[in-house]
Image: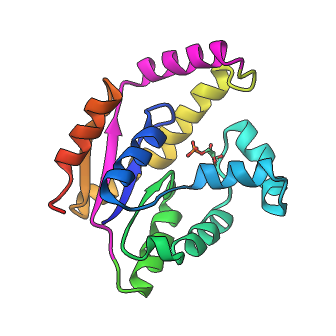
Amino acid sequence: MRLIILGPPGAGKGTQAARIAERLGIPAISTGDIFRSNIKNQTELGRRVEAILAAGGYVPDEVTNEIVDDRLTWADAENGFLLDGFPRTAPQVEALEQMLSRHGHALDAVLELTVDEEAVVERLLKRAATEGRADDTESVIRERQAIYRRETAPLADHYQQAGLLVQVDGMGAVDEVTDRVIDALPAH
Ligand code: AMP
């Protein structure tokens, strides 16, 4: 299965992506994780994107697209993958379509975790306080939500029109949400 998972920051997308991918036997590919590990290892890419991630902005499309294009050629992604955090912009949607069609592939479904924004902001603020994440101030958290609403939420409309969108209620216990997602997926 070739899948995308969409959802605002703090919706539990990364957690769900890992669990769903494991159940389906496909890799979860997170562009955020790829950037963070490059920052940690201070690679050239890491140094280029560090300030962008710290400010909660988006890495330029050309940079992000190239990383995904490369990652999708790995052997583990041959029969499927779950993309977490990509695509996030209209040009990334277009780039992904081109990457897939080059290999005669297409997406099977686009999952969207729907959540209540205020509840998510509250949860992220609590986490920032308890985990001492000084960078996660309320303004950075709200800015990330606003960027998602402006740039990424419209992608759901695009995929809805393409008949691929599967919306799942992302509120509630982690196990329940995973089960809901698995139940909502097209036959596999
Ligand atoms: P995430 O872990 O998905 O929340 O991503 C963390 C950060 O990595 C984001 O706030 C962006 O700065 C950057 N990032 C991850 N994926 C993308 C993407 N598809 N396009 C642009 N920036 C991204």
Q: Quadrant of residue 159?
A: bottom left
Q: Residue 113 colored magenta?
A: yes
Query: In terms of depth relative to the viewer, which is nearer, 152 or 67?
Result: 67
115 lies left or right of 166: right
Q: Is residue 113 above or below residue 155?
A: above
Residue at 57%, 13% (x, y): give it.
126
Q: Position of residue 78 (x, y in %)?
A: 42, 77
51 lies left or right of 14: right
Q: How many marks?
A: 0
Q: Residue 63 colored magenta?
A: no
Q: Is residue 45 above or below residue 20?
A: below
Q: Quadrant of residue 119?
A: top left
Q: Position of residue 6 (x, y in %)?
A: 40, 47
Residue at 67%, 59% (x, y): give it.
60
Query: In terms of depth relative to the viewer, which is nearer, 133 or 174?
Result: 174
Looking at the rendering, in which quadrant would you find the N terminus? bottom left
Point out the stretch of residues depicted in magenta.
Answer: 106-132
Residue at 21%, 61% (x, y): give it.
163
